[in-house]
Structure formats: structure tokens, C-alpha cells
Image (spheres, rainbow, N blue to C red):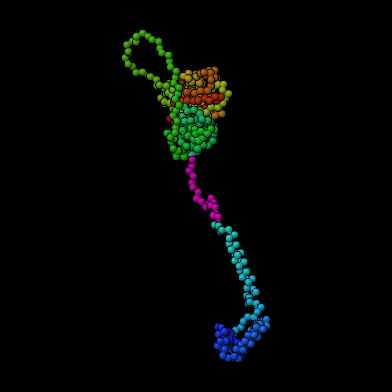
């Protein structure tokens, strides 16, 4: 009952208003003052209960309808979370921090390297085949143009293979690469070319060299007044010198100039003391190249005919093997009997038959310094 009274007293908004309300009751006022004094002396123990546990004393059932005030006792520790909650939270924070750190430190995912394509994975293009020229003569000259009148670029030997890059208009000479670092030309019968029909005509064929003009004859001495012109008669006027040669004369006989060059000319070093010719006169249409007899060669230099070469002749069905190729004619002239007393220079030459009439075109030959042994293969078939 006492606590209910106190509760009613202190639950009001203001104690003073309560006192004023009951001021007309002196006994009640005295009682209130006595209770306040007791509370001050006891430290509120009578009002809120003693003990350090902070657990309020259970109220009887008749207080169920009366609101109660249960203050927290002094020194009572505030309620705390379960002891395992903080470590679990810390572990979650640590785990999250570790995950963030791992995410920042982990390298960015990269694409797997593309698998390299192998030769079997890719389509293999069919390369363009470049025709090859394989030398089938023991040795042959490579020249600066399609003809023997062009200067030598170098020498090739049997079995060598070269890329064919062009041909002349009639397909008798091949342009190939390379000799001594230069493009060169070789006579068609000295090499074997497969698929030659696909080779284009060269568009950079050099112009043939201009042969030196023959020496001029001194003017004839003045004579008496010319006689009256004779009646015109048919004459056998010789053709003008062929290819610049003075002593070649026209082609003779009823078969014309039937010989052509099948191999060579090829020159090798022989000490430079003489000009030596080894020639092969053949008919490739008979017995796969039957040696022909009673043929010779006319040779001219600086307008002077070198007669020893016209005096020697080929031997029928005779075949010797030289360093450059087969031959059935051989002749040589020392440098002292050559024009100018030197071996090096440009020569004109042509085939002579048994009547010493020209039986081929006029060809040119350049003999380099130190090279004096030359080989040529003449064939009378195919013309």
C-alpha cells in the first residue's frame, strides 16, 4: 500500500502540485515529507529494492493490473550480445576483406591463346612453276643477248639449272637468271627447257652491237676520160658483206646457208699464246648426229682473213672428245699470225663447204683475254 501511494505521488507531473492539492490535509503532508526523508537516507533502497543482481522482486497477482516501474539498479552491466556473435562478425568481415583483396590482386582473366595453325590446317596454295633450263652441253657461253654477236656474260657447264624468264621472238634463245649476277641468254639447243611454251617473249632484248666498219680503200688514181658506157649485161654481183664481214661472200650451192650453231661458242683459257678452234660439223637428222666431212671455217678479224682456218677441214664420221664437247675439226694459229699480234678481240666466222663457198650465216665471236681455245657445234639439220 505504501508503494502504491508513493507511485501515485511521484507519477504525477509535479510534486509541488501534489502538495498544493493536499495542503488542506496536514497529516498527509507530514507523511509525504517523512517518506522523502527516508528515501534520501536509504539511498532509494526502499523504493527500488536492494541487491546487486538487478533482478526485480516478483509482484503478487493483485498487481497485475497496476503498472510497475522497474529501474535498473546501480552497477548493473548493460546487456551484451552473445560472446560468439562478435567473433563471427569479425570472421565475416575478415572473409569479405580477404575476398575483396583477392579480387583486386587476382589478374584479369585473359583469353586462352589461339592455337597456332599448322601446315595441315591451312590450304596450301599451288605455287607457280618457273620453267627451268638445264644445260645439256659440256659447257656453253652465256651472252648479253639472243645471238652470238653479243658479248659474253659468263660460262655455264653441263647439269647447271637456271630460271627461264624470257625468250626471243622465234624461240631459239632463252633468257635466264643468272650468271655472275646478271641476266643472260643461251642458245636453245644447248639447254633442256620444260614447259617452254609458257615463257613470254622478253620485252627488254638489247639491240645487237654495231660491228666496226671495214677499213676504207684508198681512192683510185685518176685515169683518162672514161670510155663510152658498154651495153648493159647481166652480172653476178656478190651480196654485200654479211654481218659486217669483208671476206664472207654470199651463200653458195643449191642448199643455201644450211648450217646453224647447235652448241657454243665456248672458250676456255689456254695460256693466251694461240687461237685454237675445235669444231664439230654434224647432221643431227642422221644417226643421232652423224659427223660430216670436208667442211671448214672462214675466220676474219679487222677485215683480214685468217687463212689457216680455211685450209683445215672436218673428217667424216670421226668424233673426238674435247674439254668443251665433241669435235671432228681442229686448227690453231699463233698470236704472231693474228691481226695486231694479240689474241683478245672480236672475230667474224662462217662455215665453208668443200668448194669454199659460204654455207652458214656470219657469226661473231669475242675472245676474252687469256681464253684462246674455242669450241663450236655446227648442225646442218633443221634448216
Give percent across and percent down for residue 250. 41, 22
Magenta stretch secondary structure, dominant? loop
Q: Name the outermost residue toward the right.
A: 51
359 to the left or right of 6: left
Give percent across and percent down for residue 33. 62, 87
Depth check, front residue: 262 or 139: 139
State which quarter of the image contains the C terminus: top left
Where, by quadrant of the figure, is residue 205 drawn?
A: top left
Give percent across and percent down for residue 42. 67, 84
Depth check, front residue: 145 or 297: 145
**Residue at position x 47%, y 30% from top?**
145
**Residue at position x 42%, y 21% from top?**
241
**Residue at position x 49%, y 23% from top?**
346
Q: Is 147 one of the magenta-colored residues?
A: no
State which quarter of the image contains the N terminus: bottom right
Q: Is residue 140 above or below residue 334?
A: below
Depth check, front residue: 195 or 17: 17
Tell me if residue 175 can be seen.
yes
> In this figure, what is the number of numbered marks?
0
**Residue at position x 48%, y 37% from top?**
164
Q: Which residues are magenta?
A: 112-130
Q: Name the outermost residue toward the top.
A: 224
Q: Is residue 278 above or below residue 125?
A: above
Give percent across and percent down for residue 70. 61, 83
Amino acid at each position: 500500500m505504501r508503494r502504491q501511494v508513493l507511485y501515485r505521488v511521484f507519477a504525477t507531473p509535479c510534486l509541488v502540485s501534489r502538495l498544493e492539492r493536499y495542503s488542506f490535509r496536514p497529516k498527509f503532508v507530514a507523511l509525504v515529507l517523512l517518506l522523502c526523508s527516508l528515501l534520501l537516507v536509504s539511498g532509494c533502497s526502499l523504493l527500488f529494492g536492494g541487491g546487486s543482481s538487478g533482478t526485480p522482486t516478483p509482484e503478487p497477482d493483485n498487481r497485475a493490473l497496476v503498472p510497475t516501474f522497474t529501474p535498473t539498479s546501480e552497477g548493473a552491466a548493460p546487456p551484451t550480445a552473445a560472446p560468439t556473435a562478435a567473433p563471427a562478425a569479425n570472421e565475416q568481415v575478415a572473409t569479405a576483406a580477404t575476398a575483396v583483396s583477392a579480387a583486386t590482386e587476382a589478374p584479369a582473366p585473359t583469353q586462352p591463346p589461339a592455337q597456332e595453325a599448322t601446315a595441315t590446317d591451312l590450304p596450301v596454295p599451288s605455287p607457280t612453276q618457273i620453267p627451268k633450263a638445264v644445260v645439256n652441253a659440256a659447257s656453253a657461253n652465256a651472252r648479253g643477248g639472243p645471238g652470238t654477236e653479243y658479248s659474253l656474260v659468263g660460262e655455264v657447264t653441263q647439269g647447271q639449272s637456271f630460271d627461264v624468264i624470257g625468250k626471243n621472238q622465234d624461240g631459239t634463245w632463252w633468257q635466264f637468271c643468272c650468271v655472275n649476277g646478271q641476266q643472260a641468254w643461251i642458245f636453245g639447243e644447248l639447254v633442256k627447257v620444260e614447259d617452254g611454251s609458257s615463257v613470254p617473249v622478253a620485252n627488254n632484248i638489247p639491240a645487237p652491237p654495231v660491228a666496226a666498219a671495214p677499213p676504207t680503200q684508198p681512192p683510185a688514181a685518176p685515169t683518162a676520160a672514161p670510155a663510152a658506157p658498154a651495153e648493159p649485161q647481166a652480172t653476178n654481183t656478190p651480196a654485200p658483206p654479211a654481218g659486217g664481214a669483208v671476206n664472207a661472200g654470199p651463200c653458195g650451192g643449191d642448199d643455201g646457208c644450211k648450217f646453224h650453231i647447235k652448241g657454243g661458242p665456248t672458250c676456255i683459257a689456254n695460256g693466251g699464246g694461240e687461237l685454237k678452234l675445235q669444231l664439230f660439223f654434224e647432221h643431227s637428222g642422221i644417226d643421232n648426229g652423224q659427223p660430216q666431212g670436208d667442211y671448214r671455217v672462214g675466220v676474219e678479224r679487222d677485215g683480214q682473213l685468217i687463212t689457216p682456218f680455211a685450209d683445215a677441214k672436218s673428217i667424216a664420221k670421226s668424233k673426238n672428245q674435247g674439254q668443251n664437247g665433241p669435235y671432228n675439226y681442229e686448227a690453231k694459229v699463233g698470236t704472231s699470225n693474228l691481226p695486231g699480234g694479240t689474241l683478245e678481240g672480236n672475230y667474224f666466222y662462217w662455215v665453208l663447204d668443200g668448194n669454199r663457198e659460204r654455207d652458214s650465216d656470219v657469226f661473231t665471236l669475242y675472245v676474252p683475254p687469256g681464253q684462246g681455245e674455242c669450241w663450236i657445234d655446227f648442225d646442218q639439220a633443221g634448216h
